[in-house]
Image (cartoon, coloured by chain):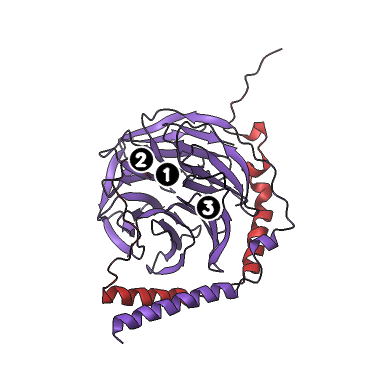
Chain colours: A purple, B red
């Protein structure tokens, strides 16, 4: 038997081992466990603010750690930093490339980043001496579009790309510290764990992967979705991952039992999920869809308990403030809405 | 998905005939197969407990009194 054939057989055997090991810990399902719990009451959130100013589709938004400022990215070639309490624009940053797909706010509040079809992640310093916002670094090495980026701190950022890899960058030197390779399709989204030791990526190979940030190792791979994973996030306690897919469903994967625990789907929902965010306690999952709505799910009972309708086009991005006080939706209709 | 995206790579095995790739795949599967797994009953209980303990601090779940909502416009006061 040639080595190739041997390796193929060993791979199949290992996959069977993983399936068996996951089954071996299924003593009870999550559904069994929550059978005695009531579904949360109907959640009715109202639009409190509409952020107007972008002139084209909004592709991404991200809250700052103060739960007040947020950044949005639009195909109109601008990043706008908003004061969401007043709706004032704190910064309107013109971009070299208007084909932006992602943006991120540094935890310190000192920087924002964005990228897209230019294959680069551009870092902007918001606290420059003369008050002007300037490009600080252009992180270039990806051979595909930048789908998502998230700061770890003022000197490190993680990016996901259409070239099927994620990268940890040193912003000061502009160099790649670690390349996370393993996905077999475009990486569409990433989320950093609350303890900053790991991150998760969702890709067009229909899987989500958990990565160790420091040693670059992929620790776990989660399948089950039947199409591209467009959105991913951590459950607030860091022990579970939520995903949203073009297959019209969202899923919750538990990290410590290494398996899918629950699927959020409804036969009336036939369009893709674009974005996802948990509420502060994790009991609610807010997901944006191609059909212009955002559905609110009871994360434990897997029932729809609310809907946010108000956009006139696809909801492309969603974010819940770190203090849990509000959720922001961004849309192809060029508006951002703040709800609570 | 996005209107200006030309194409996305389809989900296909990259270099499926490549020996080095196959070795890496097997090595990765060994890592993933070897992890410790906890019982789903414990994982479920912990999720439920976390939601339960933090529900009262979850504004979107509990509702927010108007006076504490930074996004709600304050109604103008009238002097009577």
Mark seen at residue A109 = 1
The answer to the question of whether label 1 and label 2 lie on touching residues, with beta carbons closer than 8 A, is yes
Cα distance in 3D space between marks 3 and 1: 31 Å
Which residue is at the front of the view, A88 or A339? A339
As displayed, is residue A107 above or below residue A80?
below
Residue placed under numbered mark 2 in the picture: A126
Instruction: Specify whether disc 2 shares its chain with disc 3.
Output: yes
Q: CA distance from mark 2 to mark 3?
A: 35 Å
Label 3–label 1 contact, CB within 8 A: no
- Image quarter of residue A327: top right
Q: Chain of mark 2?
A: A
Q: Is residue A176 visible in the rendered structure shown here? A: yes
Where disc 2 sits, the SS reads loop
The residue located at (64%, 36%) in the rendering is A44
Q: Which is nearer the eye, A67 or A335? A: A335
Q: Is residue B13 above or below residue B10?
A: below
Q: Are marks 2 and 3 in contact (CB under 8 Å)?
A: no
Q: Badge 1 sits on which subunit?
A: A
């Amino acid at each position: 038997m040639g080595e190739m054939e041997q390796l193929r057989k060993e791979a199949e055997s290992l996959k069977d081992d993983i399936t068996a090991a996951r089954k071996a810990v299924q003593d009870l399902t999550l559904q069994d466990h929550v059978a005695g719990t009531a579904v949360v009451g109907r959640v009715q959130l109202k639009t409190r603010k509409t952020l107007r100013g972008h002139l084209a589709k909004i592709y991404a938004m991200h809250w700052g750690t103060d739960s007040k400022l947020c950044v949005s990215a639009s195909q109109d070639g601008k990043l706008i930093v908003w004061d969401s309490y007043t709706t004032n624009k704190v910064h309107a940053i013109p971009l070299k490339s208007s084909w932006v797909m992602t943006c991120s706010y540094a935890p310190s509040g000192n920087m924002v980043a964005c990228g897209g079809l230019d294959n680069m992640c551009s870092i902007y310093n918001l606290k420059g001496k003369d008050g002007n916002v300037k490009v600080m670094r252009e992180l270039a090495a990806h051979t595909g579009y930048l789908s998502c980026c998230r700061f770890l701190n003022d000197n490190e950022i993680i990016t996901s790309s259409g070239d099927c890899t994620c990268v940890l960058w040193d912003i000061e030197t502009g160099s790649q510290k670690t390349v996370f390779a393993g996905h077999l399709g475009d990486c569409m989204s990433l989320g950093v764990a609350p303890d900053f030791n790991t991150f998760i990526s969702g890709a067009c190979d229909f899987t989500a992967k958990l990565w160790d940030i420091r040693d670059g190792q992929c620790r776990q791979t989660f399948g089950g979705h039947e199409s591209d994973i467009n959105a991913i996030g951590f459950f607030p306690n860091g022990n579970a991952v939520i995903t949203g897919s073009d297959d019209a469903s969202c899923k919750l994967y538990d990290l410590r039992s290494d398996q899918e625990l629950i699927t959020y789907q409804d036969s009336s929902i036939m369009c893709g999920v674009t974005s996802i965010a948990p509420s502060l306690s994790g009991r609610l999952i807010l997901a944006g869809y191609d059909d212009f709505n955002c559905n609110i799910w009871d994360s434990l009972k897997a029932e729809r308990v609310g809907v946010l309708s108000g956009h006139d086009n696809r909801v492309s991005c969603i974010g819940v403030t770190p203090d849990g006080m509000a959720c922001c939706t961004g849309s192809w209709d060029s508006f951002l809405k703040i709800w609570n | 998905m996005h209107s200006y995206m030309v194409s996305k790579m389809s989900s296909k095995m990259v270099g499926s005939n490549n020996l080095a790739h196959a070795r890496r795949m097997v090595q990765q599967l060994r890592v993933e197969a070897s992890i410790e797994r906890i019982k789903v009953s414990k994982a479920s209980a912990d999720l439920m407990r976390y939601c339960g303990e933090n529900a009262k601090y979850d504004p979107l779940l509990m509702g927010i009194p108007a006076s504490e909502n930074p996004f709600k416009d304050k109604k103008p006061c009238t002097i009577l």
